[in-house]
Image (cartoon, rainbow, N blue to C red):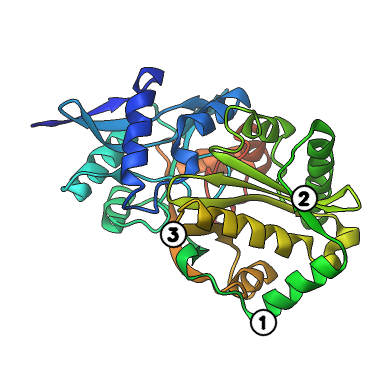
Amino acid sequence: MTMKVTELSKDDDPALTTFLDSLAQSSASVLGYHYPFYRDMLVSLGLGDPLYLGVYDGAQLVGILPSMVRRSAHGLAINSLPFFGPNAGALSSAEGKREVHQLLVDELLRRAEAEKALSCSVYTPFLGDAEDVYASAFQGGARVDKLTQYLRLDRIQWSAEVRRDLRHAEQLGVTVTTNITQTRLDAFYAIYETNCQDHGIPLKPRRCIDELTRPAVLGKRTHMYLALVEGRVIGGLLMIWSPATASYYIPCSDRAFRTSQPGSLLIDHAARHAQQAGLRIWNWESSPDRESGVYRFKKKWGSEECTYRVYCRSFAGTDKLAELGRERIASEFPYFFVWPFDRLATSG
């Protein structure tokens, strides 16, 4: 049977979901971000148009490469996927996995070249393989090495430090609930917004949280846990699940209660929930570097680490990117990884 690359539409959603559910039985690279509900959230935010490529072997979908396209007056950018992290790249269930990856990446770059795209950026998959496909296809472009951490949920055994933090939280009356009301959701977002301002973290729009906590997905594809003290929300954690992997999506803690360890109690509840539901991996998402407090916090839970990469090519030329400059790129392509700014000429 000859394999064929095609652009997936909503009509392919049942096949896409079946493919992901099946692949997740053997691969932790399948994340909640790959499912149609997350694509629909990105579209509803106006971040771009979906460009999901698939490979069919006869009637069977055997590979996908999800991405989004955003256009501006100065050109277009392709990114897999908006909001940063090891959350995309090609996935394949075929025996000739490398061939499928190659077909998908080549087709994405062909389309980018035809459009003279300012940028085409692809994240390699979480715990993925076929690294040589990306390295070869993006030769002459830019590569950014990134670090992520993860837990094997069947092996979780918290350190003495973590157990002490959990006892401390419980002694101070911190409890965890999954009963989400509009008032509690408002409090969660207010805390999250303050955390982002305090630490210079890009803020996800409120509508992102609203979309991901709709009744159709909350408790199924997404899970929210809130930390309370005397009924007051002092922290929260929004997780995104695939059948294999729980992704640490949005954590937040009220700075006035941070020493009460609400974050630790939330992680413990969320990890045990995922473990009981049969998920295998806890995906911590990206960490800045091994010297950061974020990395050390995740490490104390017994995390393992792995690397992933962001590969970029420009078909309009890096001079064009430099001419646009960092501020305009960030403004016109919000949440997209267009080009590593530290390698962009400063003339713009």
Please state, as top left, top right, bottom left or bottom right, where the C terminus lies in the image. top right
Counting residues from the N terminus, which is met first, the one under dot 1 or under dot 3?
1
Task: Label 3: state its secondary structure.
Answer: strand
- Depth check: give the residue in front, 348 or 183: 183
Q: First in sequence, mark 2 or 3: give its number.
A: 2
Residue at image coords 39%, 26%: 115
Of tags 1 and 2, which is closer to the observer?
1
Q: How many angstroms separate mark 1 from mark 2 (CA)?
A: 30 Å
Residue 311, horizontal then vertical, whole percent: 41, 51
Q: Which residue is mark 2?
A: 196
What percent of the width, then of the height, locates residue 251?
Answer: 70, 53
Q: Please determine whether, in this image, residue 130 is positioned above or below residue 307.
A: above
Tell me whether the residue at label 2 lies in contact with that at label 3, contact meaning CB atoms closer than 8 angstroms.
Answer: no
The residue that mark 1 highlights is 160
In the drawing, what numbered circle is on residue 308? 3
Three-letter residue code for mark 1: Ala
* Mark closer to the chain start, 1 or 2: 1
